[in-house]
Image (cartoon, rainbow, N blue to C red):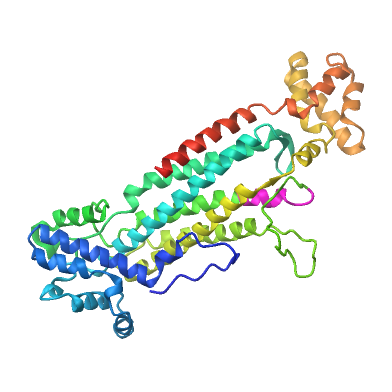
């Protein structure tokens, strides 16, 4: 039970509040919240006196506990919750302390409390995603008509617009938001079933007690509060892995397009930023590299979460520790990633002139499909493909202009004039539905962002 390590990446960027959720004191308070909810629910059913429950709830405040005594007890007992139960019982007046933790087992309290913290982190993530989608909406609209090379297999394919590229990012992020919202009812659930999940310690009121405790915590109860169940937490880590993968893909694209050989975009480079200790000219991508590295760490935690589902019999502390080692670092890293994606999108510099110049690097070869389809209407698609292919390969290997080679081809010039060829070699005339998609996705991003804020 230790604090999460501090963020090792860019020290100038503030933590969005995730790591503060998983400090020792924050975790203690979450567990106290569950103990208080348990006591109030038990009082509702007459299992413990009402005044006792009120006293337990009133004293279930981390600032009222003797932290030094708890840490000493933790060191001595090696048990994560016994010192908390002892201390809460110690500070309760009258005989209320004797009813603390009544009928519960450790994992009932710790797992439920930890999920309260993860739910708070989840809400921060949704707010971050909403802000990123809003920024992406603005960027997609602003660049809906900004042409640049579309690249497949690392080579020029057909022209696209930068707004279309952003629209792809929006599409994925919206699905991640949908997945995360849909998983809430499965992930953020309370657990109360006693030692093996059978409710034996609560008599015939166990299931009703669980529902009442869950109500106090504003969580749905686990249908079967088995201590071996971990799929809901593993699912959440997997969702964070998917989100991290998309963020990494976006960062990697921007990282690549920042290279001088492309020069189409640049992440924010605040004044005074040093790129290299020895090369003063360097404007290194820092934010995007942070994102790529952190996202790889999150994805690497997904197999650990899946492995932690392999709990034997009715409980196993080993897999509980493994799951925590997956969930909490994944949450911390996702917070860092989303902060940086937000900064990158909001501060992204675009060189639309360079994008346009890059379209001309192949001398019109990027419009090979457009020419093939136009010619194919006259002579058939396959023959047109062969004709354009021959001219394109000749241009690539001889260095001669593509337009000249096309004009010299008898098959081409029987159907297309030099003016027709020139018109077809205009990349801005062959971006298809890019602008429409960009604007449609911008509208969708704002709608989803609004839903997340609500």
Q: In percent of the image, x 20 and y 67: which residue is there?
A: 58
What are the residue bounds of the magenta stretch? 250-261
* Residue 87 within the magenta-colored segment of the rendering: no
Residue 336 left/right relative to 208 = right
Name the main secondary structure of what is drawn in magenta.
helix
Q: In percent of the image, x 15 and y 59: which residue is there?
A: 41
The residue positioned farthest toward the front in the image shown: 271
Residue 124 placement (x, y as % from top left): 43, 54
Q: Nearer the viewer, residue 78 or 216?
A: 216
Q: Nearer the viewer, residue 252 or 10?
A: 10
Residue 362 placement (x, y as % from top left): 83, 36
Residue 77 left/right relative to 352 = left
Above or below residue 264? Residue 190 is: below
Whether residue 81 is visible here, answered yes or no, is no
Give the quadrant of the N terminus.
bottom left
Residue 17 placement (x, y as % from top left): 45, 61
Residue 317 left/right relative to 180 = left
Give the quadrant of the C terminus.
top left
Residue 284 placement (x, y as % from top left): 72, 59
Quarter of the figure with residue 95? bottom left
Q: In percent of the image, x 50 and y 57: which residue is there?
A: 334
Residue 261 left/right relative to 145 = right
Above or below residue 4? Residue 210 is: above
Q: Nearer the viewer, residue 315 or 139?
A: 139
Q: In percent of the image, x 75 and y 70: which residue is there?
A: 277
Q: Nearer the viewer, residue 238 or 266?
A: 266
Above or below residue 190? Residue 107 is: below
């Amino acid at each position: 039970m230790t604090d999460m390590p501090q963020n090792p990446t860019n020290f100038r960027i503030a933590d969005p509040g995730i790591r503060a959720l998983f400090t020792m004191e924050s975790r203690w308070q979450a567990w106290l919240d569950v103990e208080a909810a348990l006591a109030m629910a038990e009082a509702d059913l007459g299992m413990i006196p009402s005044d006792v429950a009120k006293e337990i709830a009133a004293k279930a405040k981390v600032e009222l506990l003797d932290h030094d005594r708890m840490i000493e007890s933790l060191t001595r007992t090696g048990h994560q919750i016994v010192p908390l139960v002892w201390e809460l019982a110690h500070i309760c007046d009258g005989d209320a302390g004797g009813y603390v933790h009544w009928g519960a087992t450790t994992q009932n309290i710790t797992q439920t409390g930890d999920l309260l913290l993860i739910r708070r982190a989840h809400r921060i993530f949704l707010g971050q995603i909403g802000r990123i989608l809003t920024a992406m909406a603005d960027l997609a609209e602003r660049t809906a008509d900004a042409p640049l090379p579309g690249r497949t297999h690392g080579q020029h394919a057909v022209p696209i617009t930068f707004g279309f590229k952003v629209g792809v990012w929006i599409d994925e992020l919206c699905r991640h938001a949908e997945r995360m919202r849909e998983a809430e009812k499965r992930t953020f659930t309370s657990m109360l079933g006693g030692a093996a999940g059978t409710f034996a310690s609560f008599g015939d009121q166990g299931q009703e007690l669980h529902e009442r405790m869950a109500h106090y915590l504003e969580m749905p109860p686990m249908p079967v509060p088995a201590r071996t169940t971990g799929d809901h937490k593993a699912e959440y880590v997997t969702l964070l892995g998917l989100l991290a993968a998309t963020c990494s893909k976006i960062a990697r694209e921007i990282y690549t397009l920042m290279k001088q050989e492309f020069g189409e975009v640049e992440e924010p480079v605040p004044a005074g930023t040093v790129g290299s200790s020895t090369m003063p000219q360097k404007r290194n991508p820092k934010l995007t590299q942070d994102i790529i590295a952190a996202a790889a760490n999150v994805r690497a935690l997904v197999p650990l979460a899946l492995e932690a589902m392999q709990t034997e019999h009715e409980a196993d502390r080993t897999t509980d520790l493994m799951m925590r080692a997956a969930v909490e670092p994944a949450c911390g890293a996702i917070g860092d990633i989303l902060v940086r994606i937000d900064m990158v999108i909001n501060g992204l510099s675009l060189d639309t002139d360079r994008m346009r110049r890059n379209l001309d690097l192949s001398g019109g070869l990027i419009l090979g499909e457009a020419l093939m389809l136009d010619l194919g209407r006259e002579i058939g698609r396959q023959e047109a493909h062969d004709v354009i292919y021959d001219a394109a390969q000749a241009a690539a290997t001889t260095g001669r202009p593509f337009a000249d080679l096309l004009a010299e081809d008898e098959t081409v010039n029987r159907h297309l004039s030099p003016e027709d060829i020139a018109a077809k070699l205009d990349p801005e005339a062959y971006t298809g539905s890019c602008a429409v998609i960009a604007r449609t996705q911008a509208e969708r991003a704002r709608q989803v962002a609004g839903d997340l804020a609500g």
